[in-house]
Image: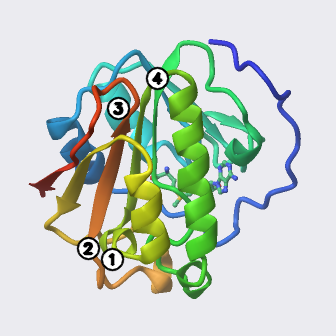
């Protein structure tokens, strides 16, 4: 599979920066119990492939990229600078790096970065009439700016995870599972008007 658009470049992004944490498999499995994805899937913040592997195990062809080199997928691709989906991909699935309740204090003041990420993901998905599934902190959804953004697109489902996530890879900083998370799912091929379903998964 070819990646149209930007050439791969050395982003200079340090793999040890504090916004990497791997998502336990059950979180992606919970998404796939409720959502069938179309065509190939782009995981643009793949890390060590925790989500990509579950998607592949469920029969999806996955194009895995990351800004940093975590030893999985194609490194050096900043999703925020990409204007197109990779060839053949009509779904984008990831755990975004910012403001989603990750274990680090820096992320907790990154609501704007999270908004930018979601807005950008929506634009990429819209360009192919595709699907977008992002894992966010459940509380984030209710914010004024976040709720306005979600309402501006075809959000077909919010899948609230009734189990709290314990993040891997964080050593002493491992999240104490204080927050609930949810998948927000957009489908640009859905007939309008779209009324999001509130679903629960564990
Ligand atoms: C929270 S981790 C999630 C990793 C993986 N998706 C998972 O769920 O296990 C966020 C990942 O986003 C990557 N990242 C941060 N900013 C990025 C950007 N602008 N473009 C692409 N990847 C980025 C980091 O290198 C990191 O691997």
What residue is at 26 percent from the left and 73 percent from the top? Answer: 180
Nearest to the observer: residue 71 or residue 22:
22
Check disc 1 and report the residue beneath it: 139
Q: Mark 1 vs mark 4: which is more N-terminal?
A: 4
In which quadrant of the rendered view does residue 150 lie? Answer: bottom left
On the picture, is 117 further left or further right than 147?
A: right
Q: Quadrant of the C terminus?
A: bottom left
What residue is at 63 percent from the left and 22 percent from the top? Answer: 86
What residue is at 85 percent from the left and 27 percent from the top? Answer: 7
The label nearer to you, 2 versus 3, is 2
Whether residue 23 is visible to the viewer of this picture, yes or no, is: yes
Instruction: Classify 195 as above or below 191.
Output: below
Check disc 4 and report the residue beneath it: 129
Q: CA distance from mark 2 to mark 3?
A: 22 Å
Return the mark for residue 55.
3
In which quadrant of the rendered view does residue 32 lie? Answer: top left
Give the image location of residue 24, x and y in percent: 32, 56
Q: Which color scheme did the rendering employ for the protein? A: rainbow
């Amino acid at each position: 599979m070819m990646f149209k658009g930007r050439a791969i470049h050395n982003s200079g992004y340090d793999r040890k920066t504090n916004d990497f944490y791997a998502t336990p498999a059950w979180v992606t499995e919970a998404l796939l119990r409720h959502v069938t994805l179309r065509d190939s899937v782009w995981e643009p913040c793949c890390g060590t492939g925790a989500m990509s592997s579950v998607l592949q195990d469920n029969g999806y062809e996955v194009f895995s990229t990351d800004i940093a080199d975590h030893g999985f997928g194609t490194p050096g691709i900043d999703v925020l600078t990409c204007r197109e989906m990779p060839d053949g991909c009509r779904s984008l699935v990831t755990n975004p790096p910012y403001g989603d309740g990750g274990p680090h204090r820096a992320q907790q003041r990154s609501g704007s970065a999270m908004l930018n990420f979601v807005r950008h993901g929506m634009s990429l998905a819209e360009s192919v009439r595709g699907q977008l599934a992002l894992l966010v902190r459940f509380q984030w959804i209710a914010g004024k700016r976040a709720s306005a953004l979600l309402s501006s697109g075809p959000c077909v489902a919010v899948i609230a995870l009734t189990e709290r996530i314990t993040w891997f890879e964080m050593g002493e900083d491992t999240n104490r599972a204080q927050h609930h998370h949810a998948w927000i799912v957009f489908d640009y091929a859905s007939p309008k008007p779209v009324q999001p379903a509130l679903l629960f998964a564990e």
